[in-house]
Image: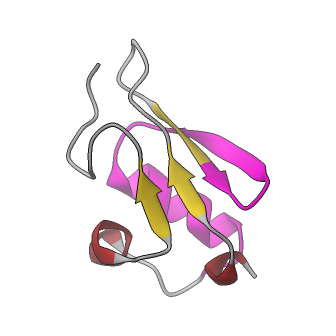
Amino acid sequence: MAGLQPIVIYPPAEDGGRRVRVGDHFVGMAYGLLDVVEFLRLAGLEDVDEEWVRQSVLVEWRDGGPEAWEH
């Protein structure tokens, strides 16, 4: 289950997108919190929303928090 795996949001790329990894798998390039929420739902974490993504200790934000989407 995705909820037991670390979730890493990488630093913003040149286009403002951030790579998202769940466990050992890259699940996509997010351009906002709604993208992250959708990737996590697709990875099996059904009860997530934007607030959960902002506050969860399972989410590691690298080089900027949940509001940093531009390089």
Give the image quarter of residue 62. Answer: top left
User: In the rendered view, does 52 fall on the left or right side of 36?
Assistant: left
Using the image, determine if residue 10 lies above or below residue 45: above
Give the image quarter of residue 19. Answer: top right
User: In the rendered view, does 32 fall on the left or right side of 26?
Assistant: left
Q: Position of residue 27 (x, y in %)?
A: 69, 48
Q: Position of residue 8 (x, y in %)?
A: 54, 53
The residue at the point 31 percent across, 69 percent down is 50
Is residue 28 a member of the stretch shown in magenta? yes
Using the image, determine if residue 16 lies above or below residue 49: above
Q: Position of residue 38 (x, y in %)?
A: 53, 61
Q: Position of residue 45 (x, y in %)?
A: 62, 79
**Can you say which quadrant of the picture contains the N terminus?**
bottom right
**Can you say which quadrant of the picture contains the C terminus?**
top left
The residue at the point 26 percent across, 49 percent down is 65
- Residue bounds of the magenta highlight: 21-45
